[in-house]
Amino acid sequence: MTGEPVLEIRNLSVEYGYDADAVRVLRDVNLTLHAGEVLGLAGESGCGKSTLAYAATRLLPPPGIITGGEVVFTSTRDDRRYDLLTATDDELRATRWEDTAIVFQGAMNSLNPVYRIGRQLTDAISAHRPEQSARQRRDRAAELLDMVGIPADRLRSYPHQLSGGMRQRVMIAMALALEPQLVIMDEPTTALDVVMQRQILQQLADLRTRLGFSVVFITHDVSLLIELADRIAVMYAGEIVEDATASQMYRTPRHPYTDGLLHSFPPLHGPRQELGGIPGAPPDLMSLPRGCTFAPRCRVALDRCRDERPALTATAFADREPHRRVACFQHEREAAAIPPSLTVM
Amino acid sequence: MATTELASSDQSDVVLAAHALSKHFRLHRGRRRLHAVDGVDLALRRGRVVALVGESGSGKSTVARLLAQLHPATSGEVRLHGRPVKVRAGRRFRAYARRVQLILQDPFASLNPIHTVRYVLTRSLKIHHPGIKGEALEQGLTDLLTKVHLQPDRFLDKFPHELSGGQRQRVSIARALGATPEVLLADEPVSMLDVSIRLGVLNLLSELKNDMNLAILYITHDIASARYFSDETIVMYAGQVVERGDSETVTQRPAHPYTRLLIASAPDPDNLAAAPETNGAKGEPPSLIDPPPGCRFQPRCPRATARCATESPPSFPVSGTQEAACWLFAPAGGNEEVPR
Ligand SMILES: Nc1ncnc2c1ncn2[C@@H]1O[C@H](COP(=O)(O)OP(=O)(O)OP(=O)(O)O)[C@@H](O)[C@H]1O
Ligand SMILES: Nc1ncnc2c1ncn2[C@@H]1O[C@H](COP(=O)(O)OP(=O)(O)OP(=O)(O)O)[C@@H](O)[C@H]1O
Ligand SMILES: [Mg+2]
Ligand SMILES: [Mg+2]
């Protein structure tokens, strides 16, 4: 399989707001990323994916508060090992972008509007590589842009002169500029056509082989993850509900929610079909049901599911799938849990 | 049903149209120009959806902005109910924006951070119901949020920074719908939504186009959703339309080599194990700064001939309503063979 752990997220909990108004958005999240691995993180809109990315890199803006847990980073290039959540600001600043880089979900909007993109790339490089000449930095910036399919004549463009997808690609280039050990990408390809998306993901795969970094790829698009990721973690209402290799997830989803995610794609090829979906809405994080958070929408839920919250544990088939985890009392069942419904047109 | 079919091809149904629309941006005070959009024709009809798909940077958002009158056109025309429109600012622009609503591509930039969801939606409801207040206003707000699958009690008093990406997108959609426009220009309105909610929102738009006779331009990278949700699909590459036709034909029997590449590259949920056959995928889009003559896809095209490098292909009929701007479809005598 893959190498040693690079990032170990343990019992991470996050709240937004204070006292009585606080919403617990992440509850005891446990997740490990191994060296060289691409870990996909999927889940419905609002389930806490971006919050996890921010908290794990300690970039969570107020009123977000990390209320517990640890995030241990282990360098693969030297023998440093530290908890990101207790590191000092100086330590964080020195290692950010070199140890861990992040592409934010709003990346399209996070370039500085008053500087040309070439300048923004070279600035990022010079902050960490002061020994390089201006010429070297410019060449590197052009090389990075080329990697994401933007012609070098656009180095002199301002952000507003680029399309949405081009700005997204500049941010991907920026994250890779210092060859970090770990890259977290939050919905990095929402504005890219599928051809460009494939091209960039291929580049990413090649770089990973060459440089050996690890990736956390956050997206709502499970079909993309099945192709791209080694392992997939599915989140629901602030918790990980299933964690398995991409092919296990695709062949035998064990959590009914994962099953629903996989079976609601409108097919592009072949006869037109009625479209499935997952009936109901995600729960209000302010007032979660007592039992399994998915139970109100689940077709196979029993009384126990409404009373008790299932923990994320090894599956009943642990001898065959030792590293797989699922949080569902019914995960041994055979039948698909989600019927075709929510018919379109 | 046959009558609606006929009526839909009638010019009188056209609400908003672009005629030979072009936008060239001047770069860095120089003389060089970036050809973002070159000679685009399209017509948005009552109760119909046109999907605009294509490569990143091909000019889709620029077309939407031109239609919304946020940019002046370099040449060509935008017509509303047959009459040319050129509004720049002030009262006339606001009157136009009431009828033609644009949902911007980036939900992180399009909501003013100092206003709550309640404020944003109230303002949009007041466009058509100036005095709305009390019970009626609350009901209107509740309806709007429910339609986009956001629970009103949870979201009405939130600020944009308290919302996730997909939640912001849905507030943008609700804002546009609140204004009950005639035309909706939706620039990747659901790109951050998971399939399940995405289907719900697209269903909602389908209902509205039927009930309110809304004309919709739907810009997307999700080709499967273009197939299910739109009547016509237009494909852009490097500032130009390369293919158009009814959505089923364009997605199932793509003609232009770029469209074929695009369709072949889409993840296929039924067959994810198979690597797609993507001829030409490696190539790069051309620079749009003073582009050379000839077909703009030619440097990447697996079927390019000498002619493609020098002469820009016009649109040729392929079958039915389908057209492709590719020499492969020139009538006999124009080029050697027809594919497929
Ligand atoms: N500053 C805040 N105050 C209160 N609630 C917040 C705040 N920021 C986020 N939330 C809530 O926390 C939840 C998780 O948000 P997050 O952005 O992590 O979701 P996400 O999984 O990334 O969703 P998406 O796919 O739509 O981007 C959401 O329901 C959101 O409304
Ligand atoms: N204000 C501007 N000044 C100069 N060039 C611009 C400006 N706005 C857009 N462009 C350029 O025009 C081209 C088309 O951009 P547009 O935003 O329309 O693309 P798009 O098809 O929407 O792409 P995406 O799918 O990535 O959003 C791009 O090359 C872009 O860099
Ligand atoms: Mg998010
Ligand atoms: Mg765009």
Image (cartoon, coloured by chain):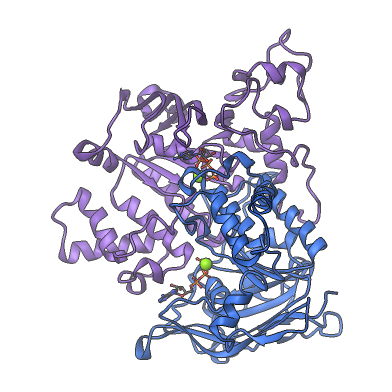
Chain colours: A blue, B purple
Q: Quadrant of residue A75?
A: bottom right
Residue A132 image point, x, y percent: 68, 59
Residue A312 seen in the figure: no
Residue found 27% across the figure and 43% down from its top: B98
**Residue in the foreground of this view, choosing between B202 and A235:** A235
Q: Quadrant of residue A332?
A: bottom right
Q: Relative to A210, is A280 on the left or the right?
A: left
The reply to whether residue A31 is in sight is yes
Question: Left or right of B223: which side holds A207?
Answer: right
Q: How many marks?
A: 0
B141, above or below B13, in the image: below
Above or below for A27 versus B75:
below
* Residue found at x 73% / y 38%: B283
Most distant residue in the left direction: B131
User: Would you identify the image quadrant in which residue B264 lies?
Assistant: top right
Q: Position of residue B214 (x, y in %)?
A: 37, 41
Front-lying residue, B104 or A142? A142
Quadrant in the picture for the C terminus of chain B = top right
Q: Of all residues shown, which one is farthest toward the top?
A: B333
Using the image, determine if residue A141 lies above or below residue B32: below
Residue B56 place in picture, x, y as percent? 58, 43
Of B169 and B6, nearer the camera is B169
Give the image location of residue A172, x and y in percent: 62, 57
**In the depicted structure, whether residue B202 falls above or below residue A253:** above
Residue at image x 58%, y 32%?
Answer: B288
